[in-house]
Amino acid sequence: MLSEKDILQAVRRHIAERGGAPKLGLPASGEITWHPLLEGTVVRCIETRSEDPRLHRGRIDLSDRPQYNRLARYPLAPPKDPAVATTLKLVQRGSVKENPCFCGNGKVACSRCQGRGDLPCAVTTTCSDCRGIDACLRCDGTGHRTRKAPEETRQAADERVTCKQCGVDEAACATCRGRGNVTCSTCRGRGTRECPDCDGAGTEAHERCAGTGHTVTWTEGIINRQPRTEEIKWPESGLPYLARQHAREYGNWHKTFLTNKDSVPEDLEDEFKALLKPRLKTRDGEIAREADLRYLPLARVIVPEHRHRVYYVYPGQTSLQVFILPSAQRTWQIAVTVLGALAVLYLLSRLLS
């Protein structure tokens, strides 16, 4: 960790280089607050194990799947890369049962036609040309001449034909010839039509065995490994964005890569040990971990001679870096000044308009 003496010397040197020493003098002391920076990612491999009863319709070869007695005790090597998701499916030893389905051959009676293979159908349908209303201009399709002579409503001869019901010429619909209906095109007048669900066979595939006549049941064990990535950024708040960005760009960060087999380095500063340990604590189901982290000591300095400035000091590539931001009070003063200037400009524009 940086010493307070080194930090104050860096601030004094920065002030002198900027030409502030003759007017304000070099600070002899300062108020120092530490802000250790810690950034990076922690990737954990979280493992879950579960069992499910399985049913397969038909035959299936499960000989290539690993078998287990107790899923919780099944040995599985840690993953080489915790960031890669994997799923392993196993079979509980002795749980596989191959059974012929009670349907016999995979077929059952069609639920729609009840095994008949056909469905009832109307022998005739209403004529689409006359809709059964103007089947005949004299008898309305009844065979009894109830209307006046067709001369009053006579249509062209090629549109009307002789009625098969009452015999009047050029009075009937050319399609149904006075009957008002035509033979059903689906069943062709037979009164039954083929069942579309079973194509007239009267049977359909049994749902339980999918028509195979055979089922296989077993207990499946599933070992699922999923990566969980945690972004590390400390402190989460309280440090100005510009100060952090400056440190990211010019700071001499210390980097460390730790797995779940590694402990926190002993030569690490106590402040960073305190930050790392809770973030490297083993989570529920964790079987592997990789932490790619970097850290940087940073000090916030306020000196009595420059109360309107805040100095941020941290190690650079060759020397200590100093970054200056206005204090909160100074920021408010600037904001009030700007707002006041804008208000004056607004009033002047209203007076001149």
Image (tube, grey):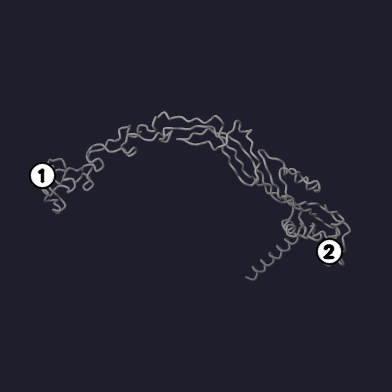
Residue at figure coordinates x 12%, y 40% from the top left: 144
Q: In this view, does 291 lie above or below 26?
A: above
**Tag 1: residue type?**
Gly
Q: To which residue does mark 1 refer?
A: 167
Q: In this view, does 25 lie above or below 99?
A: below
**How far from the left and from the top, in percent, is residue 45?**
65, 43
Residue lying furthest top: 102
Closest to the observer: 332 or 216? 216
Instruction: Give the mark nearest the N terminus, 2 or 1.
Output: 2
Closest to the observer: 205 or 111? 205
Q: To which residue does mark 2 refer?
A: 15
Is 107 on the left-hand or right-hand side of 130? right
Mark 2: few/some/many CA within 10 Å (<14, 14-19, 20+): some
Residue lying furthest front: 63
Q: Distance between the residues labelled 2 and 1?
A: 123 Å
When asked about the image quadrant of residue 85, the answer is top right
Task: Name the secondary structure under disc 2.
Answer: helix
